[in-house]
Image (spheres, rainbow, N blue to C red):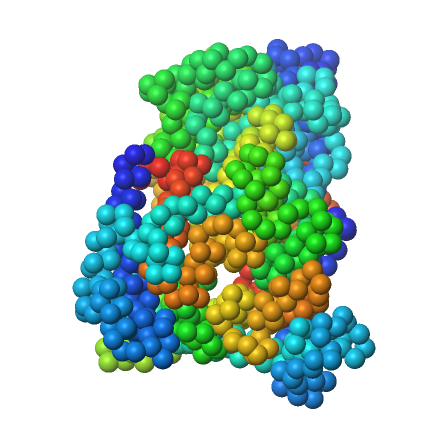
Amino acid sequence: MEEKELFAKQLQRLVKNRLSLVGVFIVALIVVAAALAPYIAPYDPIAQDYDALLLPPSPQHPMGTDDLGRDIFSRVVYGTRYALLIGVAVVALELVLGAFLGFIAGYFGKFLGSFIMRVVDMVLSIPTLVLALAIAGALGGGLLVLIIAISVAGWGEFARLVRGQVLYVKEFTYIEAARAIGARDWHIMFKHLVPNCLGPVIVYSTLYMPAAILWSAALSFLGLGAQPPTPEWGAIISDGRSFIASAWWISTFPGIAIMITTLGFNFVGDGLRDALDPKFERQL
Amino acid sequence: MIPSSRDSYSADGSSAMKNDILLKVRELHTYFDTEEGLVKAADGIDIVIREGETLGLVGESGCGKSVTALSIMRLIKEPPGKIVKGEILFHDTDLLRLTKAEMRHMRGNRLSMIFQEPMTSLNPIFRVGDQISEAIRIHQGVPKRTARDQAVEMLRRVGIPDPESGIKEYPHQMSGGMRQRVMIAMALSCNPELMIADEPTTALDVSIQAQILDLMNKLKEDYGASILLITHDLGVIAEMAQTVAVMYAGKIVEYVDIVTLFDNPKHPYTLGLMESIPKIDEWVPEDKMLRTISGVVPSLHHLPPGCYFQERCSEAFDRCTREAPPLVEIEPGHLLRCWKYEER
Amino acid sequence: MLLYITRRLLILVPVVFGITIIIFFLMHISGDPVRLMYGPNVPKEKILEKRIELGLDKPLYAQYWRWLSQVLKGQMGYSIHLRDSVTRLIKARIVATLELTVVALMFTLVFSIPLGVLSAVKRYSIFDNLGRFFATFWLSMPYFWLGLLFILILGVQLRVLPISGRGGPIWTAAGLQHILLPALTLGLPPMALFTRLVRSSMLEVINEEYIRTARSKGVQESVVIFHHALRNALIPVITLLGLRLPWLFGGAVITETVFAWPGMGRLLVDAVTQRDYPVVQGIVLMLAILVLLSNLLADLAYALVDPRIRYK
């Protein structure tokens, strides 16, 4: 291989790794911000200050203030808590729901299995956002509703993933089980199932976090998620919408925060996927 | 170096062969730059093909025969490969000195190639007829209608029944043998002077192999073309070639006419190949029924000093481990690369 | 071919049926919609009256059946707030939504295919590495925020393009102007992903043996790439397209809201906030059907490009 091309190839590998490190760094930053929010944020995120309405970014208010005098920077910092909370909660809920149903679908197969998969297909035909919107609307607004709505709308992918793994494991543990005593079936399945599932599930969870955060921001933006005065990023962007011409900072900064957070998780997820994939030369 | 009887001018000045030389490959060196180092896939290859002749290039996988063929067609991927040195004279034109456009004009037109795996060598989403007429349209500039008719004619010539509907089919709808016929039709569509066939029957059933080989021979006569036949199968060579060059680890080790090759093979590798052909028609004692050449082909990254074949040669001696033998004409028309005959 | 289409359409029927069940029961899980509509201070009689009016006094499955049979007749219910037939409301808006999604999709493909081919042909260049980064970058983008940015920069600051509403059919100048920003907002984020897919697909295809055969016939390199290779490379792209369709329609909902685009999505959001559940049911069902139909279209396109699928 030509010198230049070999170098470029190695550079690409390094860049890929570096991106994952950047991702880890970002995620760490977000977690720290969430944990230490009260110490980092200069103001109370929901405190209103009628003397400081719609102020542009300045040393006192690095990200400006909104129409109720609230400091945007503080709100964005506290927003990390909600982002993480929602992300983790949604992923956890979907994992439980999806893994459970996926396992049943895979393990019991035949009629029950295909039935569950048909349901998954149907649910997946409805755009996640739309379904979550409808559910959130039906249940009223609020954070808890948000989490439930997104989870119910999106568990299908997890279910598919787990079912696929179960089927795969079923294939080859069948041979072992044929040799072992029949009663050992369960035990063997589990022993093989968990390590096999773990990898893809971890990767998928990490990659789903950003999606969950984006969905929740979208729903909050539409007014169906976090209710005021909760400083959730999507809600803040929504607040700033009417002032887009006069006070661009209200909507802009939380959006940047969302982007950085999702980028971080995506980088980490990509890195994990590459690491767990035996063929290192993945092109996507 | 090529056998003097193949060369237009032999040692005594007389021309041993009547036909003109079509292709003359001189000192071809094609190397590959890999992560583990430089691989000399074709290391100093000299071959000659005359008009109407079939030259067989024989050897195991990885010996450089395909690389040689691809080099002639200038289809080597650069990087990582590169034709480092040499001349490929087609009639008197050095193909290596042509521009890309000029070479493109040659390919599919005056020299063409068919490949081993017809399933993967045909584009799965285009109809067979279109794939054949493509070459015709490019090189002969005829309108679609004419090219289509010619494609039908080609399919008829290669023995595909009902060619009118055949041209509308897709590769996956055909059997392996049919697909290979299509490949041959494609290669011959512009009446090339040289057809290179890289393991044309290896992927086919044995019963189909014979049919395809017969077809190739017949078409060769009809078109007056020459064939460079690449294979690892001596049986195929016996059917098809007039001259044979045996390759090992990037070099030619024996180069002679077909009759002499089977009557009087000299190189230990060639002998090994001969002996490993299972004999059905002779009675052979049980322990001699299926012989193999012990050992494996050396990795082209780590070639031994001296003769490349030494580790598998039952007749290797001291000199073989120290010096690499050159290709020598031990008898008129018989080239050999082995110290065994030098010593004598 | 026709058989294939018919067969696929028939399979859709139970799926749609199942979806109606899911939608209906999800909408009614929150308890009494009337109470939620009117709040706690309304007298019981009023609520009861309304319930009977809306047919909510009947058992759930009866309500479902009533709704379903009406849907089959083309009547999707009656909007509580807008006092209009849901069907009519949808009809008025469906074209706008389809316009938006189609144009957005076109943007995605028109940008990503050439970029993807370029990336594949010029592998390992800086361009290529950046592409990888950008794919993830755009996937992390909250597109409603992107829309707001567009509005801010192009609409407000630079005053180049209009920022809300629809200007007319797309073949008019006004129509084009108005659709540009929303379509870009919807079409840009997936672009990088598609570019990467085209790239990796091309890289695989370029190494296939039939490409070598094409070259051995003396075919020009540009024809090899754009005719022989690209068509094969687009096959997985069509698959990805099909998978992204639900996302596309979901994104349209938000984009319509941001840009005040008069489509179904905007109506949906309004209806949800107003608890106008017949409208919500109707639109969600409609969107699901649209997703399924476009999936079918994608499958057809797939069969068109890859003849191996056709003869099954």
Q: Check the image and name the residue furthest to the right.
A: A59
Residue A247 drawn at (x, y percent):
71, 66
Residue at left offset 58%, top offset 75%: A232
Q: Looking at the figure, which quarter contains the C terminus of chain B?
A: top right
Q: Nearer the viewer, residue A181 or C203?
A: C203
**Relative image position of residue C235 (x, y in whole percent):** 48, 43
- Position in image of residue A228 (x %, y %): 55, 77
User: Which residue: 54% across, 21% down?
Assistant: B135
A9 is higher (above) or lower (below) than B88: below
Figure quadrant of the N terminus of chain B: top right
**Identity of the residue drawn at 47% across and 13% down:** B145
- Side of A88 relative to B95 (left or right): left
> Camera-side residue: C120 or A75?
A75
Q: Is B222 in front, or is C183?
A: C183
Q: In the drawing, does residue A78 fall left or right of residue A92?
A: right
Picture coordinates of residue B189, whole percent (x, y): 51, 18
* Residue B66: quarter of image: top right
Judge whether C153 appears above or below C99 on screen: below
The residue drawn where x is 57% and y is 54% is C259
Q: Is residue B243 left or right of residue A158?
A: right
Q: Which residue sits furthest bottom?
A: A39
